[in-house]
Image (cartoon, rainbow, N blue to C red):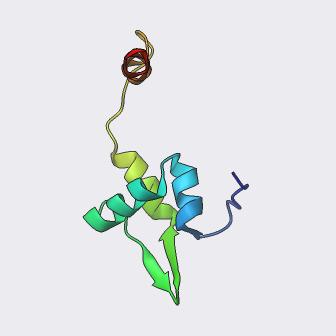
Amino acid sequence: MAAINSARLALRKREAADALAIGLTKLDSLISSGAIHAVRSGKVVLIPRKELEKYLDGLPRTDLSDGPDPLRAKRQGRAKK
């Protein structure tokens, strides 16, 4: 993953997906659903940094301090099949 310049106001789709640690398909889904708003500058789709922060702030908080990571357990359970 390339380093992302924090001074930039907007990121390209690949950069935004990397910043959120999600894939492009998931990012496209979030944009299509309106969860993340994107803008177009010519042929380039840009996602304002504030949109990424707003999306993250809206996600439910999970307290992992009192036990194992439930997502990790779920992934490990799938891998055993």
User: Compared to 62, does 5 lie above or below?
Assistant: below
Q: Looking at this view, is 21 or 6 the one in front?
A: 21
- Percent of width and height locating residue 11: 57, 67
Residue 33 image-quadrant placement = bottom left
- 79 on left or right of 14: left
Q: Choose between 40 and 48: the one closer to the eye.
A: 40
Residue at the front extreme, as displayed: 81
Q: In percent of the image, x 37 and y 69: which residue is there?
A: 37
From this viewpoint, which residue is outermost toward the left?
A: 33
Instruction: Name the residue: 57% across, 52% down.
Output: 19
Which of these two is toward me, 73 or 10? 73
Residue at 39% from the left image edge and 63% from the top image edge: 28
Q: Residue furthest top?
A: 67
Measured as percent of width and height from the top left, residue 20 is found at 51, 49
Identity of the residue drawn at 53% across and 45% down:
21
Q: Residue furthest bottom?
A: 42
Rendered image quadrant of residue 64: top left
Q: Is residue 50 above or below residue 46?
A: above
